[in-house]
Image (cartoon, coloured by chain):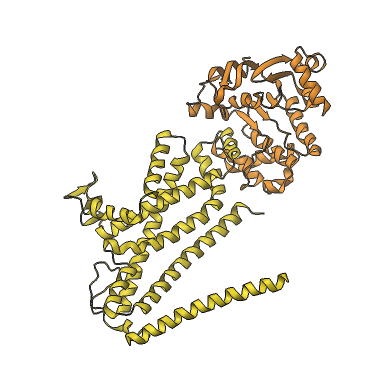
Amino acid sequence: MKISYKATTQILIALIVISIICILINNLTVNLIKTGLGFSFGWLFRPASFALAEHPLPYSPSDSYAWALFIGWLNSLKVIFYSLLLATLIGTCVGLFRVGKNVLLRLVSAGYIAIIRQTPLLLQLMFWYFVAILGIKGTIASPIGSVLSISNQGINLLGIKLSAEFTSLLLGLSVFTSAYIAEVVRGGINSVDKGQWESFRSLGLKDSTGLYKIIIPQALPAILPGLTSQYLNLAKNSTLAIAVGYSDIYAINDTIINQTGRPIEGFIILLLSFLFLNLIISNGMEYLNTAIIRSSNPY
Amino acid sequence: MPPIVKATNLTKSYSKGILALDNVSISVEPGEVLVVMGPSGSGKSTLIRTFNGLETFDSGQLNILGISLDCQNNEERKIRRIRKRVGMVFQQFNLFPHLSILENITLAPIKVQKKKRDDAEQNALILLSQMGIASHAKKYPSQLSGGEQQRVAIARALALKPELLLFDEPTSALDPERVNEVLDAMRRLATQGMSMVVVTHEINFAKEVGDRILFMDSGKVIETSTPDIFFLNAKHERSRKFLNQIKKK
């Protein structure tokens, strides 16, 4: 009796899933026939005929759509990579301040986390772009002169020029994600038994040494899963680049869809490229996770 | 010789006005074994944890090895100077689970005393063989029994060559058949002249090894007597009541 009930439920669920997929495929085919364009990727090799402000590799409007998309992918990769580093750096520091002994730092970091987590990312990106960067009058130069200069054209750091769009996206993504990473770090550190702190302190070790040698190695297994999901979020959030006019893969894809009228193919490419990117991130983190668990708990 | 520990009128209150330490005065002489007894919540652990700055206090004076501690532990360096000279063994062992037994013991000598790794390891192996567990040097804490882990914790505390050892209920978390191996190690340390403050419920250990018994209740020192007097003829009604209760167990 019970078994047949279970089987019926399973079959019912399978039927629902299959019919939804069928409806979607049907929709797609009908629409493709209606537009009369069919399903093809041949357009990828036609010239893009639009300019790109930022391209890590040589690019001109006479290059193909495929090349433009690849440039966009590289631009995405670039901003994601540097944001990951910066967000991890800021997030770790803020997370450590949050559990530290200094009362002022603890309050400031709590405030930072609260403000950043409770405002939308889009709003923060707008702030960085329109207020913080484009709002600059003249050039702000650090006392070291030629090392760092900031203007509404972006940042010039040791001769490396970062555009205003890249800078605001980098800061926006990093600051936003750092607040979440700080909470992940704090949670990980709090998960380590209080006795471990007392134990290293009673041996005369400094808090900084104990944190590095005793607490963080034990907190890492608890930190990494949370960190991975923040990294994946950051990668996906990078598509908000379009709001500040940075030519990431989403923005370029958007332009291409407008020009070619091929949203289905365009979105398939977009989906696949993000799937690929996030698989790299999550596999890398998984590898790190296994390595750390193995080294911190050898038996 | 001046006392190793000199506490005068130590007072500490937790929130809700409960006194953890109520005007506690006590001194520990060099080479002395002071056993601290009392019901749970009587302030025994709090008292010995103030001796190495793990716990703050509200008022009174505390002088450890000639260094006077301020009550709120604001002077980090001073406290670290004391901690380098005072070892502590905890109820829950608190070994570092991600480090091998050898690394557990050599960490402080290398990082705090700036010893060479080879020297620190050699010394650690000597300590481990004194504790009868030299064969476990390459293992990790989770592979050892509770009694073995606690002996590693003692070796770790000894590695800094402390002038005072604090024991906070070192056998309370052990299986009954593992208690004696730890007490034996402590006994040997006492005969070697180590100054020790031991919080414990082990009556036999207190009788044989203790030079003096400090009995506490509700944060107050009720009495300080030699074991002979305390166990046969305790001065205070409260002490006798406590002894009757633990003997029943």
Q: Nearer the viewer, residue A278 or B76?
A: A278
- Residue furthest toward the left? A138
Q: How many marks?
A: 0
Comparing A243 with A92, the one in front is: A243
User: Which residue is found at the position 33% from the left and 74% from the top?
Assistant: A69
For residue A240, which quarter of the picture? bottom left
Residue B100 or B247: which is nearer the viewer? Answer: B247
Quadrant holding the N terminus of chain B: top right
Residue B28 visible to the viewer = no
Image quadrant containing the C terminus of chain B: top right
The residue drawn where x is 34% and y is 69% is: A249
Q: Position of residue A87 (x, y in %)?
A: 40, 53
Residues B191 and A246: in front is: A246
Visible residue check, residue A23: yes
On the image, the x and y values in percent for residue B241 come to 78, 19
Q: Quadrant location of residue A195? A: top right
* Residue B191: x %, y % from top left: 75, 25
Which tint is chain B? Answer: orange
In the image, is residue A291 above or below residue A62?
Answer: above
Q: Colour of chain A?
A: yellow
Q: Position of residue A264 (x, y in %)?
A: 37, 78
Q: Is residue B91 above or below residue B244?
A: below
Q: Is residue A176 above or below residue A239?
A: above
Q: Quadrant of residue B247?
A: top right
